[in-house]
Image (spheres, rainbow, N blue to C red):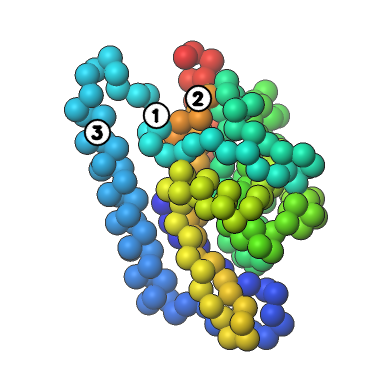
Amino acid sequence: MTMATEPGPETRSEPHPLTPASRRGSTLILMAFALALVGIVAATIAYLPRGDRPSTLSVVGGPFRLESSKGGTVDSQALKGKPFLVFFGFTQCPNVCPTTLADLGTLLDEFAAEGGDLQAYYITLDPERDTQGVMREYMASFTDRITGLTGTPQQIEGVTRDYRAFVKRVPLPGGDYTLEHTLMVYMMDRNGGFAGPLDLNAGHALALKQLHKLVADGRNT
């Protein structure tokens, strides 16, 4: 799990991003958080009777009902029986989020060309600015296999907490703000449990294998 720090482009003046040293420090803190989370889950599973041990890290994830960039709402209950992907970010993120969305879109198109069928959901961490209309316009730049989701601040806070995603609001000069946040594509199994992170950095060949395994495991359970 890594963290992205993105300056918001709403202001026209040059933003003031974190220094490299502070980026490294923040990343180390988030890595420690991720390792602690995995350790807690592993320890919990280790003490369960063998027959009761879950096949996924189900401590990550939870139900949600959010507004869709395609209109209407997406209810996670309707996703039961289908693996899916989740990625958190915000539309005013100028670099990392759109790059990841474009890369993920290309990967999903390749997966579809190989006969795969998988949907992804981009959940905003900035519901105050990312309304349903803003999300609809923003997501039009990417594949329709990725659906943007937004909601009330309370709804977004809840899904962020359930997915153990990190987000921090960072003030910028002039009253603007940016967000530090978790940068990870969550692979969720057919029961809505966390199956692991999708590794886009290792290349599409490996990522495609991960997606095929995610879908195949769903058929075999």
Query: Tag 1 or tag 3, which sits nearer the N-term?
Result: 3
Q: Residue 107's mark?
A: none
Mark in the foreground, 3 or 1: 3
Question: Does residue 190 sit above or below 162 in this rendering?
Answer: above
| Badge 2 or badge 3: first in the primary sequence | 3
The structure residue drawn at horizontal position 72% and vertical position 38%, both measured from the top left corner, is: 73
Direction from residue 12 to residue 166 in the image, left or right: left
Residue at 25% x, 43% y: name it: 39
Foreground label between 2 and 1: 2
Disc 3 residue type (three-letter): Thr
Label 3 to label 1, Cα distance in Å? 12 Å
Label number found at residue 56: 1
Q: Amino acid at mark 2?
A: Asn
Of callouts 2 and 1, which one flags the residue occurring earlier in the amino acid sequence? 1
> Tag 3's secondary structure?
helix
Residue to which mark 2 is pinned: 191
Question: Horizontal and vertical percent for residue 22?
Answer: 39, 75
In the image, residue 172 sits, relative to residue 132, either above or below, namely below
List x then y, in percent, for residue 191.
50, 24
